[in-house]
Amino acid sequence: MHAVVRTYSGKGSKKLIDVIEKNKTEVEGLLRAINGFVSYYLVRTTRGGFSVSVYQDKAGTDESIRVARDWIAKNASNLGAARPTASQGAVVFQLK
């Protein structure tokens, strides 16, 4: 498995988390449609938030990064939120 964490902070990031939350059905459909989907989490923080996307392989996380970037550009570019920082890598183990 492979995971990517996208951290949203700075100007407009709290509003961006709100917009993603309000459109969760659309976002869910886009992310689940990517091959190898395992899970997705959106976490609100005091500075904005972060998302965690888990897919079966790196191709899935790469595609999720592209899909997220395109969705934000189309639906929330007016917020002025900075591009997220992204960290990705192989999942070492998973607990449920």
Image: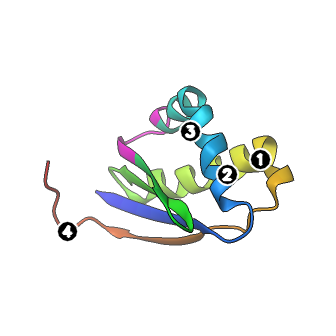
Camera-near label (1 vs 4) is 1
Query: Mark 3 or 2 closer to N-term?
Result: 2
Residue at the farthest right position? 78
The amino acid on which the numbered mark 1 sits, given as a three-letter code, is: Ala
Circle nearer the N terminus (2, 4):
2
Q: Which residues are magenta?
A: 32-40
Q: Which mark is residue 19?
A: none
> Could you say where residue 3 lies in the image, as x and y percent from the top left?
37, 60
The residue mark sitting in front, 2 or 4, is 2
Question: On screen, 37 above or below 2?
Answer: above
CA–CA distance in space, label 3 to label 2: 9 Å
Distance from the alpha carbon under mark 1 to that under mark 4:
33 Å
Q: Position of residue 63 (x, y in %)?
A: 55, 51
Q: Residues within 10 Å of mark 2 (few under 14, many from 20)?
A: many
- At 58% from the left edge and 56% from the top edge, which residue is drawn? 65
Q: Amino acid at mark 3?
A: Glu
Mark 2 touching mark 4, by CB under 8 A?
A: no
Dot placed on the residue nearer the N-terminal end, 3 or 1: 3
Secondary structure of the residue carrying tag 1 is loop
* Mark 4 crowdedness (10 Å alpha carbons): few <14, some 14-19, many ≥20: few
In this rendering, the count of numbered labels is 4
What residue would you read off at disc 4?
92
Q: CB under 8 Å between callouts 1 and 4?
A: no
- In the image, residue 22 above or below residue 44: above
Q: Which mark is residue 16?
A: 2
Q: Which residue is mark 1?
A: 76
Q: Does 36 appear in magenta? A: yes
Three-letter code, disc 4: Val
Q: Which residue is mark 3?
A: 21
The x, y position of residue 58, in whole percent, is 42, 60
Horizontal side of residue 65 vs 74, given as left or right: left
